[in-house]
Amino acid sequence: MTLLYFAWVREQIGRDAEEIALPADVQTVAALLDWLRSRGGGYASALEDLSVIRVAVNQEFAAPDHAVADGDEIALFPPVTGGAPS
């Protein structure tokens, strides 16, 4: 599985990407985020408040109950805002 980290998530974790072997008991986005947080350090810090984390699985936004599998590309990033003020 390829994990991609963006913006302040990348800064806190200390890397922009990594390849991991998906643990057998990790089958959803929520379980993946819990497992990553359990790694401690920058992972725990970056994933402390999951309400400010967005996840894409294979370049599609994904809900916490979305299935994940080896071979997936998972991106973690903060919400994106923008556009012209009204």
Image: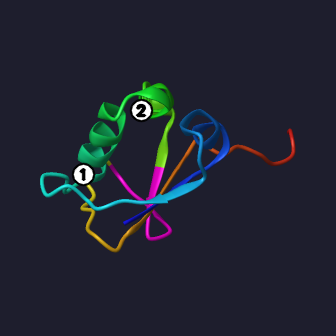
Quadrant where the N terminus sits is bottom left
Task: Indicate the amino acid at tag 1.
Answer: Asp
Specify whether residue 81 is painted magenta. Answer: no
**Which segment did they paint magenta?**
55-63
N-term mark: 1 or 2: 2
On screen, residue 81 above or below 38:
below
Quadrant where the C terminus sits is top right
| Percent x, y of residue 33 | 34, 42
Q: Nearer the viewer, residue 82 or 57?
A: 57
| Residue at screen point 39% across, 57% down | 62
Q: Helix, strand, or loop for circle 1?
A: loop
Specify whether residue 57 is painted magenta. Answer: yes
Check if mark 1's residue and mark 2's residue have beta carbons within 8 Å.
no
Give the Cα distance between marks 1 and 2: 14 Å
| Residue at screen point 58% across, 33% down | 12
- 30 lies left or right of 82: left
The quarter of the displayed image where residue 85 is located: top right
| Percent x, y of residue 24 | 13, 58
| Residue at screen point 27% across, 41% down | 35
Residue annotated with mark 2: 50
| Percent x, y of residue 69 | 26, 67
Task: Indicate the amino acid at tag 2.
Answer: Leu
Residue annotated with mark 1: 65
- 84 lies left or right of 22: right
